[in-house]
């Protein structure tokens, strides 16, 4: 059971209100590059992430707009910013970290919304059946190579329009010397 | 078999000649903080790491001086600097990456010397016997927690004056949410 790796560098999802504050009422969320999940794209637009301790510039907005604003960073970024974000699934933001977004037209102070993304796999319901994963909520991943190992707690996110892919953050990727598109092995977490 | 984690942030070991060039002939390598391995210390002195792509400031010199100059960085640092260092044991520098060190009194262009440190354990020969590890050159490490997993290819470095400790770089630590002094489990690599 091989799966392709997709590496998520720090990025931001925006709701309409926050988008308008950051980029102005007439801005458009134009496509820089289509991503592997259907409809998702890296946009041309970027913001800065600011805390009392530090700032990280050039953080890309991922489109399309959502009904919540969410900032996904790595633990390495978190140390730089002086934050301690929880590991969460997308949209599960209650009690997550506060952070300030700075755009060309304005800034948004989020009282919560900054997380470290849960390791996860996008998979279709048919693939869940074909790979014998029905009933499981998570798996492990085996990574080969000198900096290889096994990664625990990889959530299975099933939807019929998903493209089969493992999403890891830059810390997981760099620790294991993984690059975008590398193949790794799914292990059933039993 | 539990072992304490020590996290190695980017750092530099220097030989006498390079030390003199960087800090001047009268400089002293003064102790900022003793490290866990006997005789090893973080010094008060720092350099910058420079490549054609970028610079990283405030990189600490680890004492005492050695008979080779070696720069240890993480893969995350390597991307920032545009380097592709090999994973190596200390002192195994042939064909490793070139990098420039900049000190307050001068700079040193290394044609090789920049590596990513091999994951390793400091252990005494008695502990090798007591833990049943004699004959093994490496083990695996099991890490608990939501970002846990198993880390492969952890070299055993045995010497009677070592302090029992696992050394990981910041990528391995951050990927697994490990902090200095956390306890993890040794698994025999059979």
Image: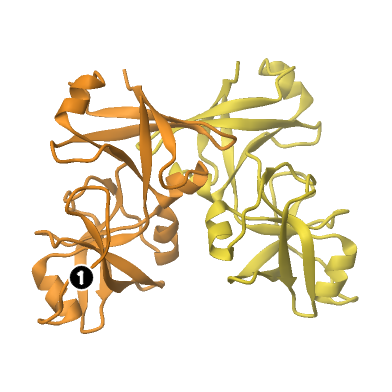
Chain colours: A yellow, B orange
Residue A79, how many percent across, how many down?
54, 59
Closest to the observer: A12 or A107? A107
Relative to A127, say whether A26 is above or below: below
| Residue B56, quarter of picture | bottom left
Relative to B82, say whether B184 is above or below: above
Q: What SS does tag 1 mark?
A: loop
| Residue B106, quarter of picture | bottom left
> Dividing the image into 4 quarters, which one contains the N terminus of chain A?
top right
Residue B83, how many percent across, how many down?
36, 60
> Dividing the image into 4 quarters, which one contains the C terminus of chain A?
top right
Question: Which residue is at 60% across, 35% downward?
Answer: B146
Closest to the observer: A6 or B151? B151
As drawn, the residue found furthest toward the bottom would be B105
Q: Local crowd at mark 1 within 10 Å, few (<14), some, or many (≥20)? A: some
Residue B148, how many percent across, how many down?
53, 34
Residue A47 makes an appearance in the image = yes
Residue under pointer 1: B30
Question: Which residue is at 26% across, 35% downward?
Answer: B155
| Residue B28, quarter of picture | bottom left
Left or right: B1 with respect to A129?
left
Read off the chain for label 1.
B
């Amino acid at each position: 059971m091989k799966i392709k790796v997709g590496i998520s560098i720090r990025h931001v999802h925006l709701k309409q209100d926050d988008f308008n504050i950051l980029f102005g009422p007439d801005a458009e969320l134009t496509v820089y590059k289509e991503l592997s999940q259907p409809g998702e794209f890296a946009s041309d637009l970027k913001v800065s992430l600011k805390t009392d301790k530090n700032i990280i510039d050039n953080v890309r907005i991922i489109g399309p707009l959502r009904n919540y604003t969410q900032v996904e960073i790595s633990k390495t970024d978190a140390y730089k910013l002086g934050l301690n974000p929880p590991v969460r699934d997308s949209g599960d933001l209650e009690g997550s970290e506060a952070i300030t977004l700075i755009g060309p037209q304005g800034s948004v102070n989020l009282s919560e919304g900054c997380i470290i993304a849960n390791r996860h796999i996008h998979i279709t319901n048919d693939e869940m059946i074909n790979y014998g994963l029905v009933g499981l909520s998570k798996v492990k991943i085996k990574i080969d190579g000198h900096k290889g190992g096994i990664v625990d707690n990889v959530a299975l996110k099933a939807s019929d329009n998903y493209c089969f892919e493992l999403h890891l953050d830059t810390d997981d990727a760099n620790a294991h010397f993984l690059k975008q598109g590398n193949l790794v092995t799914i292990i059933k977490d039993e």
